[in-house]
Structure formats: C-alpha cells, structure tokens
Image: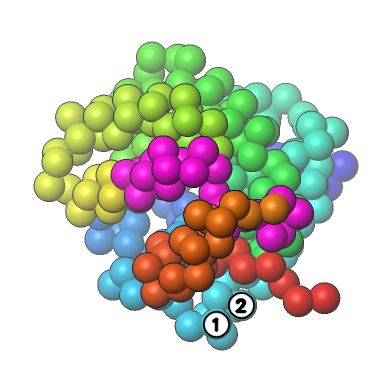
Amino acid sequence: MPATSKSSLTRLLLITIGAWGTDKLNDPQFMFTLFPLWWGISPTFAPLSDEEKLGVDKSTHQFIETVRAIGSESAVSEEWTSLDGNFAKLILCDQISRNCFRGTEEAFAYGSTALLSCRTILADPEWRNLSCAAHAFLSSAYQHSEDANDHVQNQEVISNAIEKFGAKNGMVLELKKHCDDHKSVIDRFGRYPHRNEVLGRESTEEEKAYLSDIESLFNWEKSQVKKSI
C-alpha cells in the first residue's frame, strides 16, 4: 500500500523534521524554524496568521491517507516497527493528524496510536540519548493525552531533557512551558475543555466560563476550534 511504504516514511521524516538523524536536532535555533509545522507558531513564538496556518495545514494533506492507515493499524509494514518507524507513527498520529483534520473530531482520533509508539520508544533505555527534538515529540504525545497519569510520566521526559541539554536551553525551556501549561489544564478539569464541542461533549459551567475568556486561553487551545459545516 503506497500510504505505508518506506518511501512514505522517509519523506515524512524529511519534511516534518528536516534534519532527522543529525546534530541539528539538538540546535534550538534550527528547531525554532520548524515551529510553524510542529506547533503552529512562528520561529519568534508569535501566533501564525490564519492564512499561514492554512498553508502549513495544506502542506500536510499529502499524508492524510497515511495517517488513516497508520492510525487504524492497517497495512503497516515492518520498517514502521523500527525506531524511525515509531517516531514517524508518533508524528503522524500526534502532530500531522492535527494539521490534516484541524477543527474536526478526527484531529484527535489517533492519539492512542501515538501514545503506543511513544511508550514503545521509551521502553528502550537508549531513549535518554536521543536528540532534543525527539524528546519534544515524546513529550508532545503525553501532553495531548487526557489521562493525568500520562502527564506525570511526561515529567521524566522533561527531566531527562533538562539533564541532557541544560535547563537554559531554549528548546527545553519552551518544552517545559508547554508541558506545564497542558498539565495545568488536565489537573484542573481532568480533560481539555476546548475539545468538548468538536467531540460532542457537554461542557460544565466551570468549563464554559473558562472557554469564554478567549484572551486567557493558550494558543494551542484556540488552534482546534470546531469547523463550521
């Protein structure tokens, strides 16, 4: 199946990571240039315009069928069980899915597959020697979970990043902030209220009040507003 071919895996890593397997993935300045695709913000941490977001999202649409195939665990060939393959699955199901299906329920449909790949990678102690970018993707899968235990587990990823790359490393600082911000919402609500509408969940009064204060929401909460039909 073309969607899960090795060439698709390699192309995904090259497009989404740019320098997969090189020391550039320990360089904060290089990683900042990839933030528009990774986190929907500019290299200077400013929010992207709607037009810029649309352009980034469209660039990922070539992977829509790959996301669906990997997310449904169908037609996955052996190379997808390798370290690179598991990272590719994690990126597809945790990050690219949000670009491909922004504002729809499907944006969140493949999180369990991303977490499975994350845990597979972390089961090998060698994960501690992986790049700073790899730490960011592992942490992201935990951040997107609505299970509080995953956010506790994420602390180990962040702690190792601090130990390996330094607490003042720009990427580590940004990663820790994202981790803390996501955990604060889960600790308060036990779920992400900004997903309620798109997932057909009823918001509590406290959640409604929280969501109504638009200016106080994190940028990542604003990024998955339900699409109008």
Q: Which residues are magenta?
A: 179-201
Q: Can you name the residue that lies furthest to the front here? A: 205
Above or below residue 62? Residue 123 is above
Magenta-span inclusion, residue 172 = no
Front disc: 2 or 1: 1
Q: Is residue 37 left or right of residue 133?
A: right
Disc on res. 50: 1
Residue 211 place in picture, x, y as percent: 51, 64
Above or below residue 159? Residue 216 is below
Label 2, on which residue?
54
Q: Quadrant of residue 6?
A: top right
Q: Which residue is at 56% across, 56% downward?
A: 205
Q: Which residue is at 60% across, 64% downward?
A: 224
Nearest the viewer among 24 and 97 is 97
Q: Amino acid at mark 1?
A: Asp
Mark 2, secondary structure of its residue:
helix
Residue 132 place in picture, x, y as percent: 31, 41
Q: Quadrant of the N terminus?
A: top right
Let me know if residue 16 appears in the view.
no
